[in-house]
Each structure stands twice: as C-alpha cells, then as structure tokens.
Image (cartoon, rainbow, N blue to C red):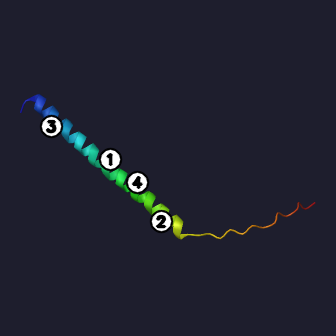
Amino acid sequence: MDPATAKILVSAALVASISLFSLVSIQAFIAQIAADLRAAKAVRVPVRAERPQPPQA
C-alpha cells in the first residue's frame, strides 16, 4: 500500500469516528434536554405569597 492511500484511509477512519462520536453526543444531549423538560412538567411546586414583615426595631 502506497503512503497516499494509507493517508486517505486513516483520514477517512478519523472522519468517520469523529462523525459517529458527534452523532452519539448530540443524541444524548437532546435526550437529556427532553428528560429534563418532562421532569420539569411533572413537578409542580405551589407558591404561596406572604405579606412582607415590617422591620423589627
């Protein structure tokens, strides 16, 4: 195998592995965002407004 062909094959393997890693990372990122949004909808915290207390002298 001549050096030019070897360089092309190594470059192609690197591009393929970087592309695969990026795809998996983006999918995991989107899945985490979706899980966080689902969790945020499920938890409702009631908010009760209270009158402010006057300063104690």
The part of the image, by quadrant, that contains residue 44 is bottom right
Q: CA distance from mark 3 to mark 4?
A: 30 Å
The reply, left or right, for residue 23 in relation to residue 6 is right
Q: Name the amino acid type tagged 2.
A: Arg
Q: Which mark is residue 38?
A: 2
Badge 1 marks a residue whose secondary structure is helix
Q: Position of residue 9 (x, y in %)?
A: 15, 37
Which residue is at 40% across, 54% downward? 29
Q: Please tell me in which quadrant of the rendered image residue 13 appears.
A: top left
Between label 2 and label 1, give the one nearer the viewer: 2
Label 1 packing within 10 angstroms: few (<14), some (14-19), many (20+): few
Farthest left residue?
A: 1
Q: From the top left corner, tell me how far across and down residue 26 is, in percent.
A: 36, 51
Are the two marked residues, 2 and 4, in contact with CB atoms closer than 8 angstroms?
Answer: no
Of mark 4 and mark 1, the one earlier in the sequence is 1
- First in sequence: mark 3 vs mark 1: 3
First reached walking from the N terminus: tag 2 or tag 3: 3
Front-most of residues 32 and 7: 32
> Mark 3 or mark 1: which is in front?
1
Residue found at x 52% / y 70%: 42
Q: CA distance from mark 3 to mark 1?
A: 20 Å
Q: Amino acid at mark 4?
A: Phe
Decide: marks 3, 4 in contact (CB < 8 A)? no
- Report the side of 42 relative to 51 (left or right): left
Judged left or right of residue 13, residue 38 is right
Picture layout, residue 49 above or below residue 10: below
How many marks the image carries: the answer is: 4
Q: Which mark is residue 22?
A: 1
Q: Which mark is residue 9?
A: 3
- Residue at left offset 18%, top offset 37%: 10
Give the residue at mark 4.
29
The residue most toward the front is 41
